[in-house]
Image: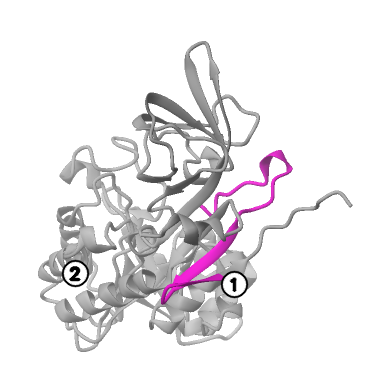
Amino acid sequence: MFTREQLSSLETPCFIFDAKELESNFLDFSAALKRSWGEHARVGYSVKTNPFPWILDEAKACGCMAEVVSDEEYHLAVERGFSPKEIIFNGPVKGREWFRHAVLNGSIVNIDSQREIRWLKELSSEGHTSLRVGIRANIDLERFCPGQTIGGSEPGRFGFCYEDGGLGDAIESIRAIPGVTLCGLHMHVTTFGRLASTYRVLASHAAKIINDFSMTDDLAYIDMGGGFYGGGRRNEGKYEEYAEAIADELSSIDRSRVALYVEPGGAVVCTPGFYVGRVVDAKDVRGVRFVVSEFSRLNIDHEMKKTSYPYVLYTSSDRRMSEQELCGFTCMESDRMCILKDEPELCEGDIVLIRFAGAYSMSFTPGFFIEDAPAVYSFRNGSFELLRPSFSKHPS
């Protein structure tokens, strides 16, 4: 953990990324996959989780692919040096031109909409051959894992439904297009518990789909998606649990020629990230102590659902207070982060550090209240490097 002296030298508010832990997370997940599956297993970093260019550079240096869900993310991955064959292109909002580019240049493209099937037909009609794509399956996971899916009893909106025949129809349509080979299966579903047992269910359905639709001969990869949990010392063994559960259920797959992809985001980038800011003011209103900080709840809790955060306080105060309400900088009453119970009294200039702030926090950071995005630092070998300064104008 950092000392107050170290943090006092930084431009705040800011995000800090522990470069060594980020690297370890990427490499550890990759190693766990290879132990269970073999050499044809790779991590595809979920760019949407945090598209900061330095993180993409770190992912690439660790041998990861880039998983993207928009034209902008695809372009960013290319700019950071990923070749098309190192990019997984997912989601229902792919643009036509980037879709064409991705398919024609060998990206892993998982079909998620009817218009993408139409675009494949257009490519075929133009004379293009040897076009290879995958397809995203939509299964009724809630039936097998009650209480785990985000939508509950409501059907998920991504991919093609296995149960109602939509997946079979889409597979038939793709196979009917001259020059197109269906060579991949995508199984992403986000869950609440992020349990290894859930991925066991997903993998068992992948095996069933592969068998039901005779996909074995053309199969080049199985993509189990993201939504994993892990990273850092307290989560040791999590990556192995996922890898073993998936590999067990796909034991019939020829791993000498079929690749396994996973798309972790928070599972690799959450724990190395910290959010740091100073206390701006503290005052009492009708018996309530409000502590105003440089933070904003919007930056690390965009859905306004959290009631607590893993924090570290840097203060020299010896006086403890039963309750202090830590608030953000915006002029929104809802910008109240959490209640600090039985902690030292915070005063102007004290520093608060929020742990596990690497996932989504920066990608959701708003420009609200005409405030610039926080600075970003990396921490490596005991030293900070400023990766992105904040920008502020001072009166001359």
Residue under the point 15% across and 61% down: 204
Q: CA distance from mark 1 to mark 2?
A: 29 Å
Residue 199 figure quarter: bottom left
Residue 121, x across and y down, in percent: 53, 72
Residue 51, x across and y down, in percent: 53, 64
Q: Nearer the viewer, residue 128 or 352?
A: 352
Query: Left or right: where does residue 274 sit relative to residue 161?
Result: right
Q: Nearer the viewer, residue 387 or 242?
A: 387
Look at the picture and state if 315 lies above or below 389.
Answer: above
Residue at disc 2, secondary structure:
helix
Image quarter where the N terminus lies is bottom left
Residue 129, x across and y down, in percent: 50, 87
Q: Earlier in the sequence, mark 1 or mark 2?
A: 1
The residue under label 1 is: 76
Q: Which residues are magenta?
A: 359-385
Whether residue 1 is visible here, answered yes or no, is yes
Q: Nearer the viewer, residue 230 or 351?
A: 351
